[in-house]
Amino acid sequence: MIVGFGGGEYHASMEPMDDEEQGENGAAAPGQQAGPGAAAPAGRGRWVRRLADILLIAGGLVLAYPFWSAGYAQVQQSRLDAAYRDNSAAFSTVAAANAGSRPRNVPPAEIVRRLAVLYGSRLKAGDPIGRLRIPLIDLDRLVQQGVRGSASLDPDSALLRNGPVHYGLTPLPGAGEPFAVAGHRTTYGAPFYKLDRLKRGDRIFLDTPYARFRYEVAKTTVVLPNDVGVLSDRGYALVLTTCTPPYSASHRLVVWAVLARATPLEKAVAAPQ
């Protein structure tokens, strides 16, 4: 939102004159009494100038908001990146320790599912899940775990300032459908600003500590904010949501994608030597 305002000019005649100037101009001398409203124009002028200064500062803050909020999001993404590296290393150790007890000839999809469940059991709200990449729109952000249950229908605004957030009532990628994610459209780095540019067949990638996923866009739709049924549609593996149109929360843009490939990471499936 841009705040605009108009200002007026202040002429010398609106400024209060000192006693000497008043005498020279035939105005009331020091011993003479001025009229009851003589100081009113000067007082009004000062208040108008103060109001103009306040509006100028407020307008500057509003105009700068997208820039400092983007800086905040970048700092938080750097913090998440460090946490993600640590979590990935720790999970690889745990997953490898469990690999020895896994039956042989388990299909890759089942391996991914088991790893997803194991990884999800270690997550709490705010933890990084994986890196979401959409080359077509230059998106590369870590996705955070959201709160679980019905409370996740309204993603935590504090988490959204850091980056995209997983709707915690939906499964992790590989554990079921759909993996649903919300993200800002216009502030805090606006990770989903260009989401409306995606078309059928465009590729979306997600890297997690247990597997790499490649999705392909199937369709995009626009729904009302209370249409939460999009989070329970089992026909799609990935759902991305954001506000639309830009600078409005009247509707939700939804990108639906199908799973093209899921590859378990070797370090998460290899038994320790």
Image (cartoon, grey):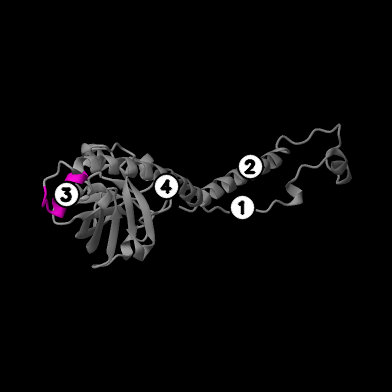
Disc 1 residue type? Gly
Q: Which one is closest to the eye, mark 4 or mark 2?
A: 4
Earlier sequence position, callout 4 versus callout 2: 2
Earlier sequence position, callout 3 versus callout 4: 4
Cα separation between marks 1 and 2: 11 Å
The numbered disc on residue 111 is 3
What percent of the width, then of the height, locates residue 66?
47, 51
Earlier sequence position, callout 1 versus callout 3: 1
Earlier sequence position, callout 1 versus callout 2: 1
Q: In the depicted view, which residue is nearer to us: 64 or 14?
A: 64
Q: Is residue 44 left or right of residue 221?
A: right
Residue range in magenta is 104-116
Q: Residues within 10 Å of mark 4 (few under 14, many from 20)?
A: many
Q: In the depicted view, which residue is nearer to us: 199 or 271?
A: 271
Q: Is residue 122 left or right of residue 8?
A: left
Q: Which one is closest to the eye, mark 3 or mark 4?
A: 3
Query: Does the magenta stretch mainly form a helix, a strand or a loop?
Result: helix
Cα separation between marks 2 and 3: 67 Å
The numbered disc on residue 252 is none
Disc 3 residue type? Ile
Q: Secondary structure at mark 2?
A: helix
- Mark 1 lies on residue: 7
Q: Secondary structure at mark 3?
A: helix
Mark 4–mark 2 CB contact (< 8 Å): no
Q: Residue at x 25, y 47 (%)?
A: 268
Q: Residue at x 32, y 65 (%)?
A: 197
Earlier sequence position, callout 2 versus callout 3: 2
Q: Residues within 10 Å of mark 3 (few under 14, many from 20)?
A: many
Disc 4 residue type? Gln
- Mark 4 lies on residue: 77
Q: Which one is closest to the eye, mark 4 or mark 1?
A: 4
- Mark 2 lies on residue: 50
